[in-house]
């Protein structure tokens, strides 16, 4: 029971803890850094889902091994554990579990909704596009000839088109959240070790979930659960216990060295001339850097990134309250809605680019417009939430737990 | 939401109006030099050149190595490659044959390479692959193993190898996840020291430079044939570049 969550959830007393532990949140106070980086991850995922353009160069996957997905899953684990463990403490296992399952249902519905939009776009392309140059590639649309199978497989989460892999992963991770939190509130370190064991077994035994029509899930839940559980572990006291490690200079040095190394390696992907300077033995040991099974190199890269971030971006940094970061934070606070919107906008933007044969200029405008739409929507959702709670018909304490951190 | 959509549409229109109309430009299809630069050699081609011996090139590929229609074969890139190579190396006997394996993955084809190479004794094999694997979402690890096996088989049979990756198909990007397969092919060619013909990046460069409109739909074979012609010429350039032969030597004799 080493949870950092104080029993009185509504106390607004921001503990005047001078040494300010790096991550854990004082009850009742929002950790804006989490929202900020989750918002950032949502923006990056949106940009990465569009065809490559200028903005793509600003996404972190070009500067190291890990990308926005790691940030997203880690923070989701962190906030979900934070919110639902408090719910479990206040209302018990059953109620908190029910709340988690309600959330899972919402995510599932969101996923199916996105699938419908995808299907509409693909059907249009399939019937309108014709080019002898691509007669082979057009074959991939053959699945449209079997809607009976395709739609059922999509509902079973086995058929997942491009860019639609994150929500199914999130659904599976959430399914195991009640048990994870239950155990973690008793034996946090044991839970983490169990999760690590599953991660290791995944590599040893090639555990995977089958996909339709063939292959496996793009994000292997057996592997990615480790990052999610690690996030939960940090939220429930782990980060506090790691404070000494986080504050050490050696950790910082190692993290920076690793980030520089990863940056150099990624540079060789984009600048082929540099390739000769990478020793072959290193290459054969390192490659392939497997995203499906959350390669250790990727995980380590995320850790290093997080360490450096936590170190230099204090939670009391005044910039967090600045209007410039407001859009990011708002997006991070409504992550399920904004994530879905981002996937939709990526589809729509892609469609627009294709239909108008737009160049780099239009590309840039579409990316920026998408980000503005995401931010405005997040602002609208926040505004609505505040307005709705003004009615005061029911105490919002219970509802807000769901709204706040629990979205993906 | 409606208003936002309106703003977005307006922004799009502004940009469309501002950018010059896409004229169907004369296709020059130059390839950026770095896309054809490689450190991985083609020793068998270099040998054949030195001895002025015949070069037998075999293109092993899937559907995207061919064009349909009555004159499809003559206008597809293997035939254009043959013409381009003959033009550059006059006096050397050059033959290009094509061996198509539509709807077969790299693993399927790799299993047949020993027999194919044994029958034809090619000097060089251009192995165009990855498309079917990407369409079927084959595990990239399995794909990598298949490439490794296939290249090893060909090299053991005494042939040079060039790997050719997927086509750049912007319309298909929402359906076809090409990048894991492109990455794998890049890594394998580096490790195996064989040149990669980066068809994907080359076609993307053409698309971005406005040489071809790869987004547009086309009912006739016109654009496709011109793309294949350019691919054939670029491939000939890569062969000469990678084998470090100097066509000017032919004139000295």
Image (cartoon, coloured by chain):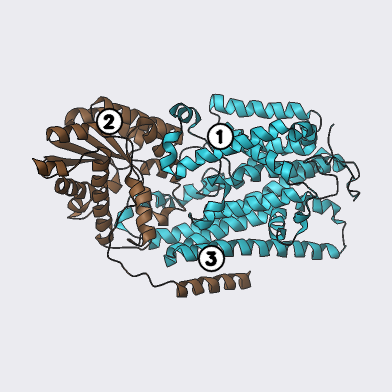
Chain colours: A cyan, B brown
Is disc 2 in contact with disc 1, using a CB cutoff of under 8 Å?
Answer: no
Query: Which of the pair B248/A73 is nearer the observer?
Result: B248
Is disc 3 in contact with disc 1, using a CB cutoff of under 8 Å?
Answer: no
Crowding near the residue tagged with mark 3, few <14, some 14–19, many ≥20 C-alpha atoms within 10 Å: some
Image spot of residue A326 (x, y percent): 72, 59
Disc number for residue B112: 2
Q: Chain of mark 3?
A: A
Mark-to-mark CA distance, 2 and 1 = 31 Å
Q: Is residue B48 above or below residue A147?
A: above
- Horizontal side of B81 relative to A257 (left or right) equals left
Q: Is residue A35 above or below residue B195?
A: below
Q: Mark 3 or mark 2, which is nearer to you? A: 3
Q: Chain of mark 2?
A: B
Image spot of residue B167 (x, y percent): 35, 49
Badge count: 3
Crowding near the residue tagged with mark 1, few <14, some 14–19, many ≥20 C-alpha atoms within 10 Å: many
State the residue position of label 1: A293
State the residue position of label 3: A365
- Tell me the quarter of the picture where residue A73 sits: top right
Q: Are marks 3 and 1 on the same chain?
A: yes
Mark-to-mark CA distance, 3 and 1 = 35 Å
Q: Are marks 2 and 1 on the same chain?
A: no
Q: Mark 2 or mark 1, which is nearer to you? A: 1
Q: Are marks 3 and 2 on the same chain?
A: no
- Horizontal side of A355 relative to A206 (left or right) equals left
Q: Residue at x 58, y 32 (%)?
A: A296
């Amino acid at each position: 029971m080493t949870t950092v969550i104080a029993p009185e959830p509504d106390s607004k007393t921001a503990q005047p803890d001078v040494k300010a532990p790096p991550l854990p949140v004082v009850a009742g106070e929002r950790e804006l850094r989490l929202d900020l980086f989750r918002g950032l991850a949502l923006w990056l995922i949106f940009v990465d889902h569009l065809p490559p353009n200028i903005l793509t160069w600003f996404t972190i996957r070009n500067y190291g091994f890990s990308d926005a997905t790691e940030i997203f899953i880690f923070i989701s684990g962190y906030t979900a554990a934070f919110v639902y463990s408090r719910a479990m403490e206040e209302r018990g296992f059953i109620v908190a579990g029910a709340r988690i399952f309600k959330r899972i249902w919402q995510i599932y519905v969101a996923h199916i909704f996105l699938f419908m939009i995808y299907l509409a776009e693909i059907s249009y392309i399939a019937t309108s596009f014709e080019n002898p140059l691509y007669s082979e590639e057009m074959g991939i649309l053959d699945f449209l000839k079997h809607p009976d199978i395709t739609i059922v497989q999509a509902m079973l989460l086995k058929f997942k088109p491009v860019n639609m892999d994150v929500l199914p992963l999130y659904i599976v991770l959430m399914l195991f959240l009640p048990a994870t939190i239950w155990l973690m509130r008793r034996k946090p370190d044991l839970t983490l070790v169990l999760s690590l064991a599953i991660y290791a077994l995944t590599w040893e035994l090639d555990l995977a979930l089958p996909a339709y029509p063939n292959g496996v899930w793009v994000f292997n839940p057996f592997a990615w659960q480790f990052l999610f559980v690690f996030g939960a572990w940090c939220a429930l006291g782990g980060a506090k216990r790691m404070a000494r490690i986080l504050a050490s200079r050696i950790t910082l040095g190692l993290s920076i060295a690793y980030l520089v190394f990863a940056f150099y390696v990624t540079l060789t992907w984009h600048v082929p001339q540099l390739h000769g300077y990478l020793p072959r033995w290193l290459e054969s040991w390192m490659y392939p850097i497997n995203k499906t099974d959350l390669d250790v190199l990727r995980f380590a890269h995320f850790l290093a990134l997080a360490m450096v971030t936590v170190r230099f971006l204090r939670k009391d940094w005044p910039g967090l309250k600045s209007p410039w970061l407001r859009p990011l934070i708002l997006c991070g606070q409504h992550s399920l809605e904004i994530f879905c919107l981002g996937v939709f906008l990526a589809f729509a933007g892609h469609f627009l680019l294709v239909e108008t044969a737009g160049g780099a200029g239009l590309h840039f405008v579409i990316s920026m417009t998408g980000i503005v739409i995401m931010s405005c929507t997040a602002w609208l959702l926040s505004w609505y939430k505040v307005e709705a709670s003004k009615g005061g018909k029911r105490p919002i304490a219970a509802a807000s737990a769901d709204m706040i951190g629990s979205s993906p | 939401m409606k208003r936002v959509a309106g703003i977005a549409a307006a922004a799009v229109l502004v940009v469309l109006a501002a950018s010059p109309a896409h004229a169907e430009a004369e296709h020059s299809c130059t390839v950026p030099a770095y896309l054809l630069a490689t450190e991985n050699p083609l020793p068998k081609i270099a040998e054949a050149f030195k001895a002025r011996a015949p070069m037998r090139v075999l293109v092993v590929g899937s559907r995207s190595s061919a064009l349909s229609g009555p004159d499809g074969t003559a206008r597809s890139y293997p035939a254009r490659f043959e013409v381009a190579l003959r033009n550059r190396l006059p006096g050397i006997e050059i033959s290009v044959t094509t061996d198509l394996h539509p709807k077969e993955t790299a693993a399927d084809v790799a299993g047949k390479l020993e027999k194919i190479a044994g029958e034809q004794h090619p000097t060089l094999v251009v192995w165009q692959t990855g498309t079917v694997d990407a369409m079927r979402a084959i595990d990239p690890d399995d794909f990598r193993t298949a490439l490794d096996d296939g290249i090893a088989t060909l090299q053991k049979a005494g042939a040079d190898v060039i790997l050719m990756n997927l086509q750049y198909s912007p319309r298909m990007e929402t359906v076809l996840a090409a990048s894991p397969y492109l990455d794998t092919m890049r890594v394998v060619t580096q490790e195996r020291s064989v040149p990669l013909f980066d068809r994907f990046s080359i076609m993307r460069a053409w698309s971005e430079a406005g040489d071809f409109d790869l987004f547009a739909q086309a009912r006739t074979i016109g654009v496709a044939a011109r793309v294949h012609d350019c691919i054939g010429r670029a491939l000939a350039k890569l062969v000469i570049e990678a084998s470090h032969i100097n066509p000017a030597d032919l004139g000295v004799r």
